[in-house]
Structures are given as structure tokens and as C-alpha cells.
Amino acid sequence: MKQHRGLAQRILAALLTMSAVIALSACSLRSQSSATPSTTSSTLSGPIPVVATIRPWGSLAQELGGNQVKVTTIISDPNLAIQEYEPKTTDITTIGKSRIEIVNGAGYDDWATKSVPKDATLVSAADAVGASEGDNPYLWFSKDVRNSVATEVTEAYIKALPNQKAYFNARLKAWKKSETTLETLIQTVASQSKKKLTYAQERPIAYYLMADLGFSDKTPKKFAQALGGNEEPTVDEVDEFVNLLGKSKHPSIFLEDSTRQSTETQEKLVTTAKGNAVPMTDVTEEMPTQETTLNEWISTITTNIAKALELRTKIQSEDSDAESTQATVSDSASPSTSGSDATPSSTQ
């Protein structure tokens, strides 16, 4: 009886709590509906002030918005450790003036969500696909995330400037063409080898891209978990990785991040990979300054992976229509950028 009585009391308490929450929500909604926002879609004539925390999302925001947006990217230095970034006072001020803010989420840039204006629209890449803190945060390498964010950003633009709906929809359509070209390249590379390909990476940056390419991750789990938790791998974990790269049956390719400050661990891994003729390519956390669009950057990485593994040579030797197939790969390496008017501006 005590157990049932205790359960009934807990249920009653829960119902009372829910009633209070509903009442508070109703008050909040009434308050919001009666308040007049400082900037409304009817008064905003453009360009829309947009803030993105990092260049991958900032470049996409510019590509989708064209001359109807003014995009400011908070972190544009490819050499910065983004997850350790401490926002400046000017960053907070910039965010406070935004009408649309685009963040990565998943614990990557939480500081950016603390100063969003009440009348601004927040677009989170993580929220778009249900990712949370603890998941791999390098979401821009996922085709599903890119498509979801592009759609949400366009919807936010239309909400802010409804009279430019046709313009924004046209730019989204143009972007989707470049995304289709990129995905065709990824599928082409993924289908070129008749054996299963593997990879190991210095940092867990390219997880989503390599999954789209059909590669299996052979990075030692404890090493990857340490880096995923922003910890330094132990000597034993580093040695396990070094031994993996030194084996005759090493991973098909090793991915390094050249923008990170060189460490003893990095030097060991790179030296071992080179000494054992393991194919290598560079995959950085931040978008390089020479790349102007997100899809161009990922296309470059994908093409470099194909070159490192000599996949084009295999195509030529195995495909009866070698020249045609090689042209497909080459053409796919440079997706159309006609949907972009300018390189996104940035604030440090």
C-alpha cells in the first residue's frame, strides 16, 4: 500500500507541476504576442544581418543568401582550435545585432547560443538532424546535415524577407545542383574500388565524409575516444596507432590535420605513415581560406583522397571507357558555384 500511495503522490505532484508549466507557458505566449519586436519582417528591407560561428556554415549562408544577406563569420582563422575558442566582446556584440544566427551545435560552439537576440532566428546544424553533445561534431561533412541546414537557412531568409521568396528559392535550387554534383563525385569515388577500403585519422574530423565514401574506420578506438573527449592519448594508445600504421596490412589511407600545432604524437604518426608508404592526405578542421564554398572544399578533399589511392589509375585500367569515366570524376571535382555572389565577410 505504501508503494501505491507513494506512486499516487508522485503522479499528483507531476500533474500539479504540469499545470503550473502550462499556465506559465500561456502567460509567456500572451506576453510574446503583445510585445513588438525591435525588427520585423515588414520593416526589414535587407540585406539581412546573418552571423555564423564558423566558415563552413558562413560560406553556405552567403551562397544561399546572395546580395540579400550580410554574413559575418565569427571564426575564420583555419589555425584556431575552435572547440577551445573564447568569444570576444566584439563577437557577442556582433551576435546581438544579428537577425539570423547559424551555429554548429553538438557542444562545438555553445558560447554562441547565449547571446541570440529574442527576435532572431537560430539555425543549429545539430538540431536539424538530432545530433547532441558527445556525437561527432564535424557535421558539415555529412550530406544529410548540409541539405537540412540549407533548407532551414532558406526558410529563415524567407521569413525575414518574404518579398524575396522567389530569389531565395532560386538560390537554394542552384545550391542543390552543386550538392548533387558533389554527391555524384562521392558516389563515383566510393564505387571505384572492388575491395573494401579503410582509413585511420589523426583527429576524428572526416567521419561523416568517409562514411559517405564507404570507408571503414580503423583508427584505434581508445586513441579516437581520447581525442573525442579533448584529452591527450596515452603513450600506449599512441604506440597502438603507430604499430597499426607500421603493419603490412595498414589502413588504405591516413588522414592528417596539418593546421594543428605539430606535436610529438603527430610527428610519430606522420613519420610512420610515410616510412611505410601509407597513402596520406590532409583533412583540416576549419575550411581553408582559399576555398570559397563548402561544397568546393569537400569536393577538393574527396578528389585528393581519390588521387592518394590512385583510384583514377584503377578506373583507366579496369573500365573499357576509361576516358569517359575519368572525365566524370574530373568534372565532378568542381561543383557549380553560380549560386554565390561573394565570399562571406568575417569578423575576428
Image (cartoon, rainbow, N blue to C red):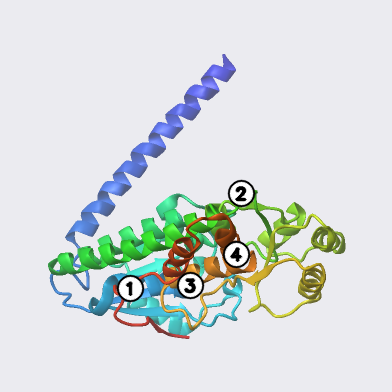
What element does badge 3 sit on? helix
Return the disc, 3 or 4, that comes first in the chain's sequence: 3
Within the image, what quadrant is residue 207 found in?
bottom right
Residue 32 at x, y percent in the picture: 24, 58
Q: Which residue is mark 1?
A: 63
Q: Earlier in the sequence, mark 2 or mark 4?
A: 2
Return the residue at label 3. 297
Q: Which kind of residue does numbered mark 3 sit on?
A: Trp
Compute the Cα span from label 4 to label 1.
34 Å
Camera-side residue: 241 or 20?
241
**3D distance between C-alphas at marks 3 and 4:** 23 Å
Determine crowd level at label 1: few under 14, some 14-19, many 20+ residues with C-alpha closer than 10 A.
Answer: many
Residue 136 visible in this rendered orientation of the protein:
no
Name the residue type under label 2: Lys
Q: Secondary structure at mark 1?
A: helix
The answer to which quarter of the image holds residue 37 is bottom left
Quick one: SS at disc 2?
loop
Mark 1 or mark 3, which is nearer the start of the sequence? Answer: 1
Q: Name the spot of residue 4 as percent of width and height, x first.
A: 53, 17
User: How crowded is the residue under tag 4: few (<14 C-alpha within 10 Å), some, or many (20+)?
Assistant: some
